[in-house]
Image (cartoon, helix red, strand yellow):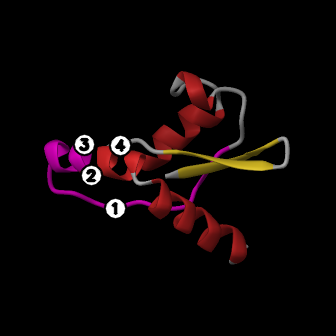
Amino acid sequence: MILSKKNEKWISYVGYTNNIENRISLHNSSKGAKFTKGKKWQLIYFEKYKNKVDAMKNEYKLKKNYKLRTKIKRDFINNE
C-alpha cells in the first residue's frame, strides 16, 4: 500500500508487483496507474507472497477492507 497527501487528506492505493522499487518509481513519475498520476507516493505497507495468484487474492481483500486500510494509514501517520 502506498500513501499520498492531497489537499490535506491522506489517500492510499493498493496494488501488487514483483518489483516494489520500480513500481513506486513509476507511480511517482506519473507512469503508474491512472489514479496515482500527479502525486508523490511513499510505501507504507507490503506483504510478500510466493506466487502471483496469492498476491492478487490478498490485494483484492486489502482493497475492500477499508477498516484495515484506515488502521494501516493511521499507524503510519502517527509514527511519522
Q: CA distance from mark 1 to mark 2?
A: 9 Å
Which residue type carries mark 1?
A: Glu
**Percent from the top left, x then y, of residue 26?**
55, 32
Q: CA distance from mark 3 to mark 1?
A: 11 Å
The quadrant holding residue 30 is top right
Circle nearer the N terminus (3, 1): 1
The quadrant holding residue 46 is bottom left
Q: CA distance from mark 3 to mark 4?
A: 7 Å
Q: Which residue is labeled 4 in the image? A: 16
Relative depth, front residue between 62 and 66: 66
The quadrant holding residue 56 is top left
Circle nearer the N terminus (2, 4): 4
Within 10 Å of disc 4 (Cα), the crowding (few <14, some 14-19, many 20+) is some
Disc 1, SS = loop
- Mark number displayed over residue 56: 3
Which residue type carries mark 2?
A: Asn
Circle nearer the N terminus (4, 1): 4
Does 68 sit left or right of 50 as displayed?
A: right
Q: Which residue is labeled 2 in the image? A: 58
Give the mark toward the camera: 3 or 4: 3
Q: Residue furthest bottom?
A: 79
Give the mark toward the camera: 3 or 1: 3
